[in-house]
Amino acid sequence: MKRSVLTRYRIMAYVTGVLLVALTIGMIGKYALKMDGAADFTQVVSIAHGWLYVVYLIFAFDLGSKLKWPVKKQIWVLLAGTVPTAAFFVERRITRELDAAADAGTPAVAKA
């Protein structure tokens, strides 16, 4: 597997995670704090997150298919972009697994 496949997945995981956290903060501002301008902010961020989440799904699926992940693991990684901050933790775990596999010289097929 090329390192660029992992790199583009990592970038999209961070982008998706940051946008989802920003959206969560915007929703709190909009509904709980009744802040002016929060509605416009949440509209823009939600549209950006929606489109970029689709790109994240494509890159995560590409990574999982190249590594021949089991379906359960693939779904877990794909859903990480829907829970605030989950994308950061899942990305870090996947990167560590692949780095450990590369250091050991084993094929980069991760466990479920």
Image: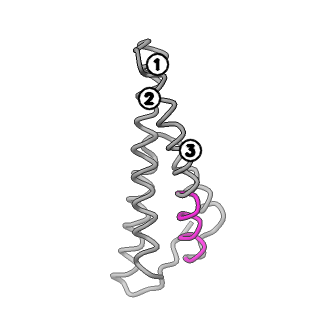
In magenta segment, residue 23: no
Q: What kind of element bears circle 3? A: helix
Q: Position of residue 105 (x, y in %)?
A: 38, 87
Q: What distance separates the C-alpha of mark 2 from that of mark 3?
A: 14 Å
Per the image, the residue denoted by label 2 is 41
Please tell me which residue is depicted at 46% across the width and 46% down the height of the picture. Answer: 86
Q: Position of residue 38 (x, y in %)?
A: 43, 22
Q: Amino acid at mark 1?
A: Lys
**What residue occupies the far right of the structure in this picture?**
71
**What residue occupies the far top of the structure in this picture?**
34
Which is nearer the eye, 23 or 69? 23
Q: What stretch of residues is rendered in magenta? A: 56-66
Q: What distance separates the C-alpha of mark 1 from that of mark 3?
A: 19 Å
Residue density around tag 1, few if under 14, some if 14–19, many if 20 or more, within 10 Å? some
Q: What kind of element bears circle 2? A: helix
Please tell me which residue is depicted at 46% across the width and 33% down the height of the picture. Answer: 23
Per the image, the residue denoted by label 3 is 50
Q: Position of residue 96 (x, y in %)?
A: 37, 67
Per the image, the residue denoted by label 1 is 30
Residue depth check, mark 2 versus mark 1: number of the one nearer the observer = 2
Q: Are marks 2 and 1 in contact (CB under 8 Å)?
A: yes
Q: Are marks 1 and 3 in contact (CB under 8 Å)?
A: no
**What residue occupies the far left of the structure in this picture?**
103
Q: What kind of element bears circle 1? A: helix
Residue density around tag 2, few if under 14, some if 14–19, many if 20 or more, within 10 Å? some
Please tell me which residue is depicted at 38% across the width and 59% down the height of the picture. Answer: 92
Q: Amino acid at mark 3?
A: Gly
Left or right: residue 70 compared with residue 8: right
